[in-house]
Amino acid sequence: MGQMTRFLAVFMFFPFLAACEGEQASGPSLDEITTAVIERFRDDPYAKVGHVENVSKTNSISENDDEVIVMVSYELVFDRTVSDFADDVTERGKAAGSMDDVGDTVSDAIDLVKTKMLAMKEGEFKAGDRRIVENEIRLLKSEKGWIYRKGAQ
């Protein structure tokens, strides 16, 4: 009789495990997290001189069923220096013909100043350098999966 009781106990435990696994799987996938990190990075001043690689989730906090804060770690890989970026902005400024071109150049010049200030604060870099970045992003559950919620940080 003891073996039958243990068998039934184990058998009844499986639905509980499946429910726990389903709960974990309901959060954002690594692909959705990576997409969100890249989307957020587009607004970063360093986006003009680098890109994101090797995104990993380090932790998460569920705000409710359809909102989660995800702690992430990723590598910021520098593609060029601030000086290279400045040269590009200067060339575009000289070649600007329309008001739209001038507006884009002014926007790039503002990003250049922000990038230079960050480089002064965090240290200079050269093309090929890598830095580990740890950050948080907020994701919302939508009809088509988990999406980055801009401005919620």
Image (cartoon, rainbow, N blue to C red):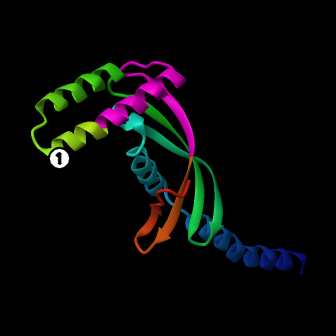
Span shown in magenta: 108-135
User: Residue placed at 75% from the left, 74% from the top?
Assistant: 13
Q: Quadrant of the N terminus?
A: bottom right
Location of residue 125 (image quadrant): top left
Q: Is residue 125 magenta?
A: yes
Is residue 61 or residue 9 the one in the foreground?
Answer: 61
Q: Callout 1: few (<14), some (14-19), or many (20+) C-alpha neighbours within 10 Å? A: few
Picture coordinates of residue 123 (x, y %)?
A: 51, 20
Residue 40 x, y percent position in the rendering: 44, 49
The answer to whether residue 81 is seen in the rendering is: no
Extreme residue in the front direction: 99
In this view of the protein, which residue sits in the foreground, 71 or 113?
113
Q: Name the residue carrying label 1.
A: 100
Q: Quadrant of residue 145?
A: bottom left
What residue is rendered at 46% in x and 18% in y?
A: 124
Q: Nearer the viewer, residue 56 or 18?
A: 56
